[in-house]
Amino acid sequence: MSGIEIGIAAIVALLGLITLGMPIAVAMLAVSFAGVAMIRNDTVALRMIGAVANDSIREYLFAVVPLFVLMGLLVTVSGVGKDTFELFQRLLARVKGGLGIATVFANAIFASITGISIASASVFARVAVPEMVRHGYTRSFATGVVAGSSVLGMLIPPSLLMIVYAVLAEESVGRMFLAGIGPGVLLVAGYTALIMLLARRRPEMVFAAQAEQTAEPLSARLAVKMGSPIVILVGLVLGGLYGGFFNPTEAGAVGAFGALVIALLRRSLTPRSFWSLLVETGRITVSVLFLIMAASFFSRMLAMSGLPNHLAELLLSSSIGPYGFLVIYLVLVIVLGFLIDSISIMLILLPVALPIAGEMQFDLIWFGVLTVFAVEIGLLTPPFGLSVFTIKAALDDDTLSVGEIFRGALPFVGAMLLCLIVLIVFPSISTFIARS
């Protein structure tokens, strides 16, 4: 077999093993080892797996992963998400559909200090959904808003997916974070417009009963009390990062320390819960880094086979052109999102797609934003729909079906697709701040 044939066989074997239920990282390692052994020999494969494990994990940059994960978990425990929602709830109490918009805004702020979509879905399922139902919103719409807005956690910086992409594409993490700001604002605006439109034109989708929407007056003192932890954390992390005071790893450390101080001041952390948070941080970090190591091995095996360069030459000489490739790639990302999780999609596709995107002269920062955006659509689509299942688990309501949540999230999937098209047509939304 030629190297290209081995590369194709490796991809088919990887998809087959994943379909059979093998853990993705283990499948990647097994397929990559077999591929290198077939292209060269067993000795080279053994040496390469050791080199990959050393090279892919020892980078100082990877310390940012546990730090941002720990910060997100501490913020969740400290009740900052609840305060953020209540603050926007009071500010938007008189707006039709205001609680839905408040959920979107609160999730956007929460995303800027956590970077984990599932954390947002879990927190706001408990905080926002009961409040919206109490004020006369349908359960489907309430859960759909939470599911839709939870994806902002991986788009608005800091973002775990942005970090993973930056590592795989060898791009600056700071620039990737900056590139997420414009698309994040665009998606918030799109969601806001959608909620206002549905509330006026299709009120039966939004309201189960026209209950009076009241809220206690918001005094300046209360606003400061609710908003100050959010402002402090955003200032520490994003202000320090974009102001040039910290690199991404240092920003993560400062943010984690700030979140720890807030949790201690609020007395929301016990020794047992803190230990549980540390264990959960370690579990998430190890799983992410193990996946990255496996993906690095898979990427090197593919490069050795010559398949990415062959595909790039084939696509460049074909009639579909660069944007034809881009559309096919994004459709594939979205379809895979029906079946597997976000990080795994990126780790499987990017080793093949990045060399092709580079050959086609795409801006890899913009390409990364499109990838993250498309990947996040999978959080809302059946049958995988991780955000939907997270909301279902967080609410623990036997009368609420998963299908009801999926129906509520469907309009937000449409809004995401529309925003994705806008980002393709106007790349400067992503690249203007990052490249300035």
Image: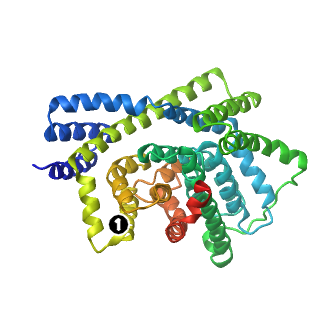
Q: Is residue 187 above or below residue 247?
A: below
Return the x and y of residue 17 as percentages of the image width and height: 24, 45
Residue at the top extreme of this rendering: 271
Residue occupying image coordinates x 65% and y 58%:
104
- Left or right placement of residue 314 versus residue 208 in this view: left
Return the x and y of residue 287 as percentages of the image width and height: 42, 35
Return the x and y of residue 297 as percentages of the image width and height: 30, 38
Quadrant location of the C terminus? Answer: bottom right
Return the x and y of residue 35 as percentages of the image width and height: 19, 41
Q: Quadrant of residue 296?
A: top left
Q: Quadrant of residue 196?
A: bottom right
- Left or right placement of residue 136 versus residue 214 in this view: left
Residue at the left extreme of this rendering: 1
* Residue position for label 1: 325
- Going by the numbered disc 1, the residue's amino acid type is Phe
Q: Is residue 100 above or below residue 18?
A: below
Circle 1 packing at 10 Å, graded few (<14), some (14-19), many (20+), is some
| Residue 396 in sight | no
The foreground one among 73 and 62 is: 62
